[in-house]
Image (cartoon, rainbow, N blue to C red):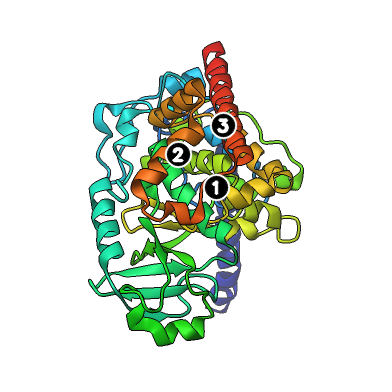
């Protein structure tokens, strides 16, 4: 019995060693199998369907900054988004509309090389309809000013007016008359170009403390330090507008202000963007062309200028540009355009001109109007005709000087040549 009890521990030890050896052998075999499987070529994943892209980055215009080790080659400049599309892009298949349904006809976003497609333009929010704007202007000119409030309309000299018909308007009092003149002329030039629906309705008003329109706020006018007989602008107040941040490519490579040249298009870039971004780019292309013609430096150009001391400025709101709830862009506060802007061309054209050159896709209607103004050499004449017909107080501020009229025509001619250059580039592809 004693021998048997001494022999039992030895048998158990031997059995344990055998089990441990078996486990080690099994583990080794599994590791060898896994290594072999990794060396063997496996089946390829199916390609990503066209139109699929990573979700938008924090600014809604493409990817967030790449992770460590990821190439930045996918980040594109604004020119890469709006320059001449390649053949691959022209042949791009249909995509989904903002709500998920396909765009009508599943068409390419660009037609004939340089024009936004008709289907895409139909997706652009309508803005301020001509009939609606005319009705508001008529009512605002006839209404009395019920009250004036500070702080909602920009400069400290401006006021938010409540009118007797219940509507509201921003009243802009210029530091000098040319600012109000620039606001009015820019509004009517937008009408000549066919893009006035992007600007809120604007009328001029003569401040007279004993006059019918302003008499109810006589005491408030005394505290405003406005000059008697000054001409101010009344711009329709619009609720629920939000800030607009420039497309991410500007934030990544802002072009002229940083000394980098805007890069050419990589084929197919436009076709890879979702419709909601394309719809906004249609509006941006009009905005940049409009700001070049008016030499407006108080919008995107001022942001670009500020890059020299604020490298993150392009990630902040664009000056004097807002978005309506339906996604339409609203071109606000255009008083820096034309008169004031033309005096400062030497300072601001190094920013305005590269921005224009970065756009090589246009609304066809805008391009046609530019071509007609170029052919007839009638930019100033058309603006004068429209201004005099639609603004009763036009003579109080006057029109462009002869030199300013020549500058407007020269800028129209420059835009026309640029569009022709884009068309030639597209034809050569």
Give the distance between the C-alpha atoms of the residues marked 3 and 2, in whole angstroms.
Answer: 11 Å
In-front residue for pair 85/74: 85
- Across and down, in percent, residue 237 comes to 35, 66
Q: Which mark is residue 26?
A: 1
Location of the C terminus by quadrant is top right
Residue 409 in which image quadrant: top right
Q: Secondary structure at mark 1?
A: helix
Sequence-earlier tag: 1 or 2: 1
- Of badges 1 and 2, nearer the viewer stands 2
Residue 325 in which image quadrant: bottom left
In this orientation, does residue 77 appear? no
In-front residue for pair 213/362: 213
Q: Residue at x 24, y 39 (%)?
A: 101
Label 2 neighbourhood size at 10 Å, few (<14), some (14-19), many (20+)? many
Residue 168 in which image quadrant: bottom left
- Across and down, in percent, residue 240 comes to 35, 66
Give the distance between the C-alpha atoms of the residues marked 3 and 1, in whole angstroms.
Answer: 85 Å
Q: Secondary structure at mark 3?
A: helix
- Across and down, in percent, residue 275 comes to 37, 40
- Across and down, in percent, residue 257 comes to 72, 47
Q: Residue at x 69, y 53 (%)?
A: 305
* Residue wearing tag 3: 409
* Residue wearing tag 2: 383
Residue 397 against residue 145 in the figure, above or below: above
Give the distance between the C-alpha atoms of the residues marked 1 and 2, in whole angstroms.
Answer: 88 Å
Sequence-earlier tag: 3 or 1: 1
- Of badges 3 and 1, nearer the viewer stands 3
Residue 62 against residue 157 in the figure, above or below: above
């Amino acid at each position: 019995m004693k021998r048997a009890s001494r022999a039992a521990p030895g048998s158990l030890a031997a059995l344990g060693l055998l089990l441990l050896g078996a486990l080690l052998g099994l583990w080794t075999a599994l590791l060898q199998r896994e290594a072999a499987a990794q060396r063997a070529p496996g089946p390829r994943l199916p390609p990503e369907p066209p139109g699929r892209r990573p979700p938008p980055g924090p600014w809604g215009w493409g990817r967030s900054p790449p992770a460590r080790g990821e190439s930045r080659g996918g980040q594109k400049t604004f020119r890469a988004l709006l320059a001449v599309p390649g053949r691959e892009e022209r042949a791009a298949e249909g995509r989904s509309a903002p709500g998920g349904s396909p765009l009508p006809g599943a068409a390419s976003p660009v037609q004939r090389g340089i024009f936004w497609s008709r289907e895409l333009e139909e997706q652009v929010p309508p803005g301020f309809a001509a009939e609606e704007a005319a009705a508001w202007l008529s009512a605002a000119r006839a209404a009395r000013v019920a009250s004036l409030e500070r702080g909602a309309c920009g400069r400290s000299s401006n006021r938010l007016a409540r009118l007797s018909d219940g509507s509201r308007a921003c009243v802009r009092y210029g530091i000098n008359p040319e600012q109000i003149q620039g606001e009015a002329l820019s509004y009517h030039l937008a009408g000549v170009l066919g893009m006035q629906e992007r600007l809120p309705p604007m009328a001029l008003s003569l401040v007279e403390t004993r006059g019918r329109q302003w008499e109810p706020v006589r005491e408030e006018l005394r505290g405003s330090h406005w000059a008697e007989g000054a001409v101010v602008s009344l711009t329709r107040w619009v609720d629920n507008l939000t800030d607009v941040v420039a497309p991410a490519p500007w934030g990544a490579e802002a072009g002229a202000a940083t000394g980098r040249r805007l890069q050419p298009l990589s084929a197919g870039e436009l076709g890879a963007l979702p419709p909601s971004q394309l719809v906004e780019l249609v509006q941006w292309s009009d905005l940049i062309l409009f700001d070049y013609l008016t030499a407006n430096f108080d919008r995107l150009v001022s942001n670009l200028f500020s890059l020299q001391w604020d490298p993150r400025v392009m990630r902040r709101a664009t000056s004097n540009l807002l978005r309506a709830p339906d996604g339409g862009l609203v071109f606000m506060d255009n008083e820096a355009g034309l008169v004031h802007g033309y005096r400062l061309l030497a300072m601001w054209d190094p920013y305005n001109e590269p921005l224009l050159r970065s756009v090589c896709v246009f609304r066809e209607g805008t391009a046609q109007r530019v071509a007609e103004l170029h052919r007839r050499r009638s930019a100033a004449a058309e603006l004068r005709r429209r201004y005099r017909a639609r603004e009763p107080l036009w003579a109080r501020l006057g029109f462009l000087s002869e030199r300013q009229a020549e500058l407007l025509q020269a800028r129209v001619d420059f835009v026309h040549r640029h569009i022709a250059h884009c068309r030639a580039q597209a034809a050569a592809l």
